[in-house]
Amino acid sequence: MILSVSGLSATRSGRTILHPTSLDIEQCESIGLVGVSGSGKSTFGHMLIDDLRSKGLKVAHVPQSPEEALDPLRSMRFHWHEAERALGLDTGSTDKKTLFTALKIEDGDLRKRPWGWSRGMQQRFVIAMALISSPDLIVLDEPTSALDPVTAAATMDLLEQHREDLNTAMILITHDLGLAARRVSKLMVMHDGRIVEQASTEDILERPKTDVAKYLVAHRSWAVVPC
């Protein structure tokens, strides 16, 4: 199955922040959306999610920080049951054990509030919630920026293993070229609200064509980042 969007755009205060953009996503494909801060990456991600959901497709979203998804005053069990209800599922009907085991949070105490879990476990829990319905696509917006490199790498490894089992496609939104270089097969470079270059990850890293892609690749520190 190919997920397609066409002509996505957005304006704010009369200013175009996302120019008309189209995209085809193949089943289980992994795509990285990279660019400097303010280039329109997150806006594109939100527009993509809204468009595909309006077509009845299952699209999950993982935000930059677990604090964006978890209420510090509510237990982890409450969050899980709320996610089930939001998807129209019976409480307790999902295969929580398989997801928790796959993401190595099976020992987490669901009676605790988020601050009773480590940041890495919180983010894996958010990813587990996103995977409840075996989505067609998961959109991750800077999903490891709040984690140390070792925890980030382990989290992405676990996600990739389970995502492939589900045949779920992935859009990874990040300004971290090191993260994208190791995790996706295709890169799209965004600048000033436009996709200015897209190609295989190898082609862009080795033969960038646009100035912004050359700028990102020129900062070679990405090549040694472990995640």
Image (spheres, rainbow, N blue to C red):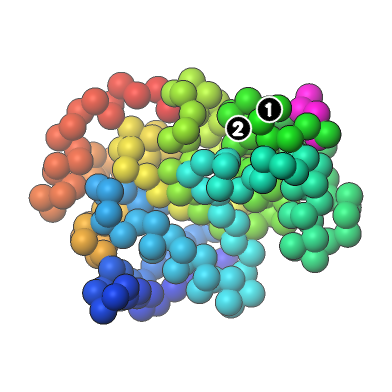
Q: Position of residue 71 (x, y in %)?
A: 67, 45
Q: Quickly name the residue at label 1.
A: 117
The 10 Å Cα crowd at callout 1, few under 14, some 14 to 19, many 20 or more, is: some
Q: Quadrant of residue 116?
A: top right
Q: Position of residue 186 (x, y in %)?
A: 36, 49
Look at the image and tell me in which quarter the N terminus lies: bottom right
Asked if disc 1 and disc 2 are in contact, CB closer than 8 Å, the reply is no
User: Which image quadrant: the C terminus?
Assistant: top left
* Count of numbered marks: 2
- Please name the amino acid that badge 2 sits on: Leu
Label 2 crowding class (10 Å Cα cut-off): few <14, some 14-19, many 20+? some
Judge left or right: residue 19 versus residue 159: left
Q: CA distance from mark 1 to mark 2?
A: 18 Å
Specify start and end residues of the magenta stretch as a single range: 106-110
Lower sequence index among marks 1 and 2: 1
Residue that appears at 80% across and 60% down: 85
Between 60 and 160, which is closer to the camera in this rendering? 60
Up/down of 35 relative to 85, above or below:
above
| Location of residue 34 with respect to 144 vertically, above or below | below
Amino acid beneath label 1: Trp
- 216 within the magenta span: no
Q: Quadrant of residue 198?
A: bottom left
Q: Residue at image x 32%, y 73%?
A: 12
- The residue carrying mark 2 is 158
Q: Position of residue 40 (x, y in %)?
A: 31, 60
Query: In the image, what residue occupies the spot 57% across and 41% down?
Result: 66
Q: Circle 2 — which element?
A: helix
Residue 25 higher or lower than 19, as above or below? above
Could you tell whether 99 is left or right of 154 in the image? right
